[in-house]
Amino acid sequence: MTENKVDVLLVGGGIMSATLGSLLQLVDPSLSIVMVERLGEIAHESSSSWNNAGTGHAGYCELNYTPQAENGDIDIKRALSINAAFEVSLQYWSYLVDKHKLPAPQNFINKTPHLSVVWGDDDIAFLKKRHTLLSRHPLFEAMQYSEDAATLRDWMPLVMDGQDATARIAATRVDHGTDVDFGTLTRHLVTSMQQNANFKLLLNHQVKTLKQDKSGIWHVAVKDSISKHPKTLQAKFVFLGAGGGALPLLQKTNIPESKGYGGFPVSGQWLVCKNDAVIKTHLAKVYGKAAIGAPPMSVPHLDTRLIEGKPALLFGPYAGFTTKFLKQGSKLDLLQSVKANNVLSMLAVGKNNMDLTRYLIGESLQKHKARMNTLRAYYPAAKDSEWVLAEAGNRVQIIKQCDEKGGKLEFGTEIVTSSDGSIAALLGASPGASVSVQAMLDVMKRCFKDRMEHNDWQQKIKTAIPSFGESLIDDANLLKQVRTQTLNTLKLT
């Protein structure tokens, strides 16, 4: 075995690891950084263009980010938070484009209006109230609302083509919504990092064990799947950004903070349009309301995408039941994740979410005709022969211990760090990639606390992200300044 000493070890070759590595290079180019990816190429799992939703999640169209209470009140706090976090990503990408560390923005991000659509009196009342609340805030002041058939036909012609003339329908729209090719973005971030001699990428390397010595150094055993040669990397700091694979890796660390966490895997599928004429007709991301019992990642949407430079039109995702934590994972992943410290919370979640389990199994057993019938709610004129099924990525929802129910299912993202800040893991799914910059800044604040408090690091981050240390939710003037700059630089106006 050979020993390799590094300052930072990034496990997983996705958008999170690439973003963290890029930010750390920004503040300290002298840091030695190694990225380990178990597959033969980066961004091939959760960050893959086909596996990721591609929506620049900003709360514009995702109705699940503004839940409605039984008394009718709508909570917009999460939508504000996610929108502000996405603005942080836009600032950083804009800076990298300016510095020629990313290519022309149309290679990875494109303007794509974000729409929410609903049918029926109750849902229309909800959408109208949601628009009223959100549009009062500077973050959402550009949001439009309409029930006018002619306007809606202009906004979303496929949705209106063949709609029942007597049906009540309403939609909101934000013109500066985005489609993001996170797979391409990840590859460009890593290519940029490779210009620094202190960065090394190890493909086809899988982490086997993680052990911390008394001095705080992590000894991470990895195996080259091609040569079969094992090696050990000694790292001062380890980040586990392996998508659904992060939970099993976190469990291997045996840090106290990992205890009690479990995972609930969910698979996904898309219907993909084969008719170029139909694809060209639709230019928007049109989101509806999730079916009762469906996980938030299954919010149905008719979705314009630009994947590796080619226009695409997708509908879905259709959720499914799986025991694999990664698309290219093992069917034993779920079983192997059950430990003495999380078995009770996982059993409690299983008991309390039987409706969800039945829903996922039912989704996975659907025939093409049933999937097409779901699509026709959003595109009534859809033809069976013009749509094919494609596999999307897997997501692992977080299971946590809960005093009341024994365990609860979380649908967001969560950062888990050791008490000494020497290791961090990112668990969960949406909004995920869209808020990767804010999430990785949070990792740096927790794991590089002393250096993040130094003026040198703060000024470097502030140069790249002008809103760093301030609130875009509370400061309308700052928001206007940074949004104007990022929309222009990224060609989103």
Image (cartoon, grey):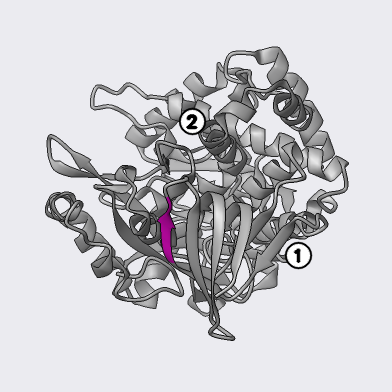
Using the rendered image of the protein, determine whether residue 492 is visible from the camera's viewpoint. no
The 10 Å Cα crowd at callout 2, few under 14, some 14 to 19, many 20 or more, is many
- Quadrant including the C terminus: top right
Using the rendered image of the protein, determine whether residue 330 is visible from the camera's viewpoint. yes
Image point (62%, 63%), residue name: 4
Image point (73%, 45%), residue name: 25
Label 1: state its secondary structure: loop
| Bounds of the magenta segment | 209-213
* Relative to 471, 426 lies left or right: left
Q: CA distance from mark 2 to mark 1?
A: 30 Å
Label 2: state its secondary structure: helix
* Relative to 293, 287 lies left or right: right
Q: Is residue 165 magenta?
A: no
Number of residue marks: 2
The 10 Å Cα crowd at callout 1, few under 14, some 14 to 19, many 20 or more, is few
Q: Which mark is residue 309?
A: 1
- Quadrant including the N terminus: bottom right
User: Quadrant of residue 182 in the image?
Assistant: bottom right
Q: Which mark is residue 79?
A: 2
Front-most of residues 112 and 342: 342
